[in-house]
Each structure stands twice: as C-alpha cells, then as structure tokens.
Image (cartoon, coloured by chain):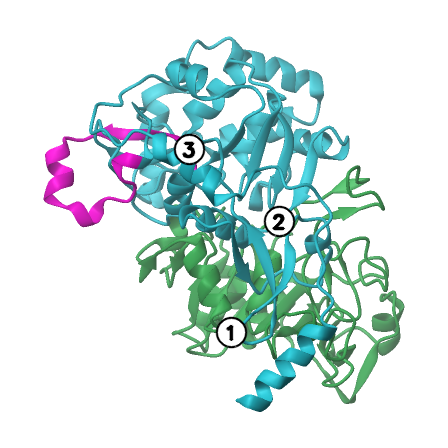
C-alpha cells in the first residue's frame, strides 16, 4: 500500500491535467443553488396552472432550459410548442437526448446556446435539416458533452454538489470542446474527468400521473428525469392525467418526483404527441416524417410552423389539426401492438 | 452458397461475436438486429440493454428510438440513463456497437462533424449522444460499416468516441478504464481487430468476393495483417432465414 501511495505521489507531480476549452453556460456553485432552493416553496398547495401561464411566467428570455423525456418519448410537447408560440428568445438548452423537441424549438429560433450531446438527429428516422442548418451556421453556440455526461451533471446538481467525477470522454475532441476538467483522484491517483453540476433555470417534464401538488408517477424508462426534476430551479410537469392525492398516499413508493420539486402542474392528455408515451400511445411516425420532410426547404418549414404552431391557439387545436381523438386511438393501438404493428 | 448482401453479412458476423450470457448496449438499426439475431441463434440469454433504461426486453419489433416502448417491452427492468451508464462504468457491460463517419487506425471514431472549425462545421452529424460514453466504458466496442478510403482515414476531423487514442497504452494513460477499447470492425470487405501491443487496426479475415488489395485500397491508412488471414465465414442459410423472417421482416435494415 505504501508503495502504491508513493507511486501516486509521483503521478501527481507529473500528471498534466487538461481543461475543455468551451464555455460553461451555467453556474455550478452549490451555495448559489442552495440560496435559491432555500426560498423555493415547500408548501403543499395546489399548483394547477395552464400551459400559457407557465411559459409566460416561468421562462424569461435568456433562461437556460431543459426538456425531460427522450426526444420523442414522453416529451412535454405542449410546453415546447408554447415556448415557440410565445416566441421566447436567446434560451440556453440542455441538449441531452433531444430529437423532436429540439427540432420544434429550433424551428422557433428560440435557442442561442446549447450543451450538445445529441440534438440534430432523430435516431433511426434521420437528421433534422433545420437543426443542422442552425448548428452549421454558427448561430447556436455549442459546448460538447455526451448523454451520460449531461446525466451526471444533472445528478451532481440533484446531489447539491458542484461536480461529479467520471471516466468517460477523456482523450477525445468531445472533451476538448467541452467545459469539463481533468482531475486526479485523491485516493487512487487515477485521472478522471470532472463534470460541473448543471442547475437549469427551468425544466418541463411530461409524466403519466400527477396530483395537484406535483407528486408524480412515471412508467417505463425514466431517462434522466429523476435528477432533472431535482436539479432544476423551476419545474413544470404536464401529466396525462391528474390523480387524487389519496392514490399517491396509498402507494408512496411509486412517487417518482415529489411535490417540493414542482412549481406548476398542467393536465395535458396526449401531451407527448407526436412522441411516444409508454403504455399509452406510440409516436406518430407520419407526422414526424412530415416535419423532417418540410424542413428540407426553409420556406416550406416556415409555412408548416405557421400552420401547426403559430396559427393554433393551443396544444388541443394542434392535436385536432393532426387527426384529433381518432388519430390518438390509432396510436394507442400501435402502442399495444394491435393489428400487429 | 446462399445469396446475401453486405449488410446481412455484417449483421451475421457481428451476431456471432456476442456470446450467450453477455451484456450488450445497442442502438437502433444494424446493432439491434445483430443482437436479436444472436439471441435467436446461439445466445438466447444475451442481455440487450438500451441507454434510456431498457434492460433485457423481449423485442416485439425493431425499436425506432433507443428509448421507445419497445426497448422495455416485457423487459426485466425499465431503468434510467444514469443507471445504464453507471453499469457500464462499473464494468458490467461487455459489448457495444458504434457507428460513425470516420474511423482511424486506432479505432477512434468521428460522429460529430466534418470541417476544421468546431463553431461552424461544414457538416454537423448527430454528435456523441451516448456513443462516447459506451466506447469509453464498455469492455469491447464493435463497429459495422461500409469501407472506403475516406471513411477509414489517418486524420479524422474530430474524435467523438475514443478508440485506442494514439495507440500503445495511451488510452489507459488518458484516464479511460483499463483493458477497454475497440474489438472488431466489421466491414463489407473484411473483419478487423487491433494489434495487442501497438493497437493498430489489423485485418483478421477477408470477406468472400474481396481480395487483400480491395481491402487495402479502400482504406486511407496502411493496414496491419494477421499472420494467418482466413476468409470470413459467409452467412449460413439458417442465419439468413432468421434475420429475414424474424428479425427484420420489413427489411428496414437489411433492405438498405
């Protein structure tokens, strides 16, 4: 053991510790975060609100925002649309597994800086031509990260820390264009990457069930939402359905997000459309394909966004424009593998 | 000999590299097809994992997203991204598959951009997503790709995901976990591994219908060659039948 420690001391003297060169968009200071959370309400009071109010009152131009779910799975589409509809500007964005959500928000030109892990692709569906143009033009300032790295940055914040160490991204250009730093483990002498805690100003998360206080249940893969809800300063949950608090109390181990994290609750059935909502409805692949196809021509996209978002007064009008309850019923059948699809 | 296309061959070769009882994190597309084929041939207990949290699903169809409902259909666990990535970091995940626009002789992969200005790339690709994480933290990384001299290059524009970095011990010295790294590069022309010491890409077998010259001519750097070069075992009737009828009946992947 003594010998090992001796070697570690030697490593320390020779270890050349590098830093990522791109900008850190958010403050990782845990005491600043604590000062904010000290004042955040813990009251068990109804937080019912509307999509319009939430976006008007909880997001200011220039804020740094994060969207829960997984791009086109369990995404808070009503909030994402409303951000575009209310023409929010110069937002920072946590591009952690973002696909269709980023596509919509970029169509509204709402973002000017982005922690990027995955934003221009829509996985097996292909790439968003518009998101790609936005990134290639240089009008969105980028700092590189990865999915796990952003997960752990949120986890560091959820833990009330300023950073977490991990063993990925070292030695790559992903590290070089990040804002991570190399550190030496004080116990083993090994080199780790240190990831700064990410405390977003605002997060929107779509859940299956919530009560009026914001106690939430989620079914299926949870991605990073447990930490996102805890790390973010202001949180809105949109829920497929409101449930009585009694149901929460009868099964407290099912509470995925507790009320004290949540500032506003909005019931939005089919609120992940056109994304997939596990155990409820599958994604509307035809509608997402339409997005991908109109994006190839900026004028077509402009018309499409006008018709789909600016000219619809809210998310329900948008749902009706795209087939309404009849379409939703179809997507429920796809989810449940009825008709073999 | 059965008729098959390059994608079918790559998927079959990849599937054979996944042994029963192993864990593998896959994306959508060819890697998922390879893992499903492996389960349906020789590795019924291969544990398929998805980065959004799905563990050991009974996949009813090919997923569209690595987080969609199919990725935890009748699964053993629907977990979270940090849980999956931490399981990789703990050393419990044996394999993963990556894709990319460029790869170099040490298996470093670019899936981020083409150009020399990061703030204004000529072409932007999706970027890391979970690729760097999986390449950093899983024991063995594999890649299936069509091979040409531009894609296999000595100087990728960006290193998104780590291979053996600068070769030798440089990967571990950079801080990445010991004994991890690229394992097999499966192309339409050949199957490559990496030299134990130098970590330079080394051809292990050449696919039927291609010559050593084809393989070298379609690579932008000098390839290392194993002492004995075999011909890659072509897909069997059984493999092709399962792949076409059960794994990808709509030809989403193998029809490309």
Q: Which residue is mark 2?
A: A145
Q: Chain of mark 2?
A: A
**Disc 3, disc 2: CB below 8 Å?**
no
Q: Dividing the picture into quarters, in which one does residue A245 lie?
A: top left
Q: Colour of chain A?
A: cyan
Q: Position of residue B12 (x, y in %)?
A: 58, 70
Q: Of tags 3 and 2, which is closer to the observer?
A: 3
In percent of the image, x 44 and y 53: which residue is there?
B81
- Does the stretch in magenta take in B235? no
For this view, does A178 lie left or right of residue B46?
Answer: right
* Stretch of the chain drawn in magenta: A232-260
Do circles 1 and 2 both sit on a common chain? no
The answer to whether B77 is drawn above or below residue A91 in the figure is: below
Q: Which residue is mark 1?
A: B94
In percent of the image, x 56 and y 26: which residue is there?
A105
Q: Position of residue A162 (x, y in %)?
A: 51, 49
Q: Which residue is mark 3?
A: A36
Q: Position of residue A300 (x, y in %)?
A: 66, 17
10 Å neighbourhood of mark 2: few (<14), some, or many (≥20)?
Answer: many
The answer to whether B75 is drawn above or below residue B186 in the figure is: above
What secondary structure is found at the residue carrying circle 3? helix
**Disc 1, disc 2: CB below 8 Å?**
no
Q: Of tags 1 and 3, which is closer to the observer?
A: 3
Give me the C-alpha separation between circle 3 and circle 2: 26 Å
10 Å neighbourhood of mark 3: few (<14), some, or many (≥20)?
Answer: few
Q: Which chain is green?
A: B
For this view, does B213 lie left or right of residue A328?
Answer: right
């Amino acid at each position: 053991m003594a010998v090992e420690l001796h070697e570690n001391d030697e490593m320390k003297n020779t270890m050349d510790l590098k830093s990522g060169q791109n900008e850190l968009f958010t403050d990782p200071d845990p005491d600043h975060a604590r000062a904010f959370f000290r004042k955040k309400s813990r009251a068990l009071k109804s937080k019912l609100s509307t999509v319009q109010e939430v976006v008007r009152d909880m997001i200011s131009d220039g804020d740094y925002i994060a969207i829960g779910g997984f791009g086109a799975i369990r995404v808070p589409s009503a909030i994402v649309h409303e951000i575009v509809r209310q023409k929010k500007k110069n937002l920072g964005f946590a591009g952690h597994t973002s696909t269709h959500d980023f596509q919509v928000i970029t169509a509204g030109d709402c973002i000017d800086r982005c922690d990027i892990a995955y934003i221009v692709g829509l996985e097996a569906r292909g790439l968003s031509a518009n998101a790609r143009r936005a990134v290639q033009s240089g009008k969105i300032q980028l700092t590189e990260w990865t999915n796990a790295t952003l997960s752990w940055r949120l986890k560091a914040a959820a833990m009330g820390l300023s950073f977490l160490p991990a063993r990925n991204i070292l030695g790559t250009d992903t590290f070089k264009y990040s804002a991570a730093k190399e550190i030496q483990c004080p116990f083993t002498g090994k080199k780790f990457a240190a990831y700064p805690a990410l405390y977003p100003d605002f997060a929107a998360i779509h859940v299956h069930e919530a009560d009026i206080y914001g106690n939430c249940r989620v079914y299926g893969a949870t991605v990073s939402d447990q930490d996102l809800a805890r790390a973010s300063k202001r949180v809105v949950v949109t829920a497929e359905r409101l449930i009585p608090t009694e149901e929460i109390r009868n099964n407290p181990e099912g509470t995925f997000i507790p009320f004290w994290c949540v500032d506003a609750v909005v019931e939005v059935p089919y609120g992940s459309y056109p994304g997939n909502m596990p155990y409820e409805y599958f994604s509307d692949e035809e509608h997402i394909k339409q997005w991908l196809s109109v994006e190839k021509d900026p004028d077509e996209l402009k018309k499409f966004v006008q018709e789909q978002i600016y000219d619809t007064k809210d998310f329900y009008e948008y749902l009706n424009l795209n087939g309404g309850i009849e379409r939703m019923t179809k997507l429920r059948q796809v989810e449940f593998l009825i008709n073999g699809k | 000999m059965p008729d098959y296309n390059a994608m079918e061959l790559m998927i079959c070769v990849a599937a054979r590299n996944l042994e029963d009882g192993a864990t593998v994190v896959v994306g959508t597309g060819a890697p998922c097809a390879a893992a499903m084929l492996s389960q349906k041939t020789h590795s019924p207990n291969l544990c398929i994992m998805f980065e959004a949290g799905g563990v050991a699903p009974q996949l009813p169809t090919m997923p569209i997203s690595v987080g969609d409902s199919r990725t935890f259909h009748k699964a053993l666990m629907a977990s979270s991204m940090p849980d999956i990535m931490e399981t990789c970091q703990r050393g419990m995940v044996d394999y993963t598959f990556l894709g990319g626009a460029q790869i170099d002789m040490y298996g470093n992969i670019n899936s981020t951009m083409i150009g020399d200005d990061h703030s204004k790339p000529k072409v932007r690709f999706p970027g890391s997503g979970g690729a760097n994480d999986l390449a950093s933290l899983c024991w063995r990384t594999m890649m299936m790709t069509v091979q040409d001299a531009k894609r296999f290059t000595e100087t990728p524009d960006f290193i998104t995901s780590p291979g053996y970095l600068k070769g030798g011990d440089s990967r571990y010295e950079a801080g990445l976990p010991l004994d991890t790294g690229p394992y097999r590069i499966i192309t339409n022309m050949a199957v490559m591994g990496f030299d134990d010491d130098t970590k330079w890409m080394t051809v292990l077998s050449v696919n039927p219908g291609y010559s050593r010259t084809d393989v070298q001519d379609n690579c932008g750097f000098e390839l290392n060659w194993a002492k004995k070069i075999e011909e890659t075992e072509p897909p069997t009737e059984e493999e092709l039948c399962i792949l076409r009828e059960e794994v990808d009946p709509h030809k989403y992947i193998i029809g490309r």
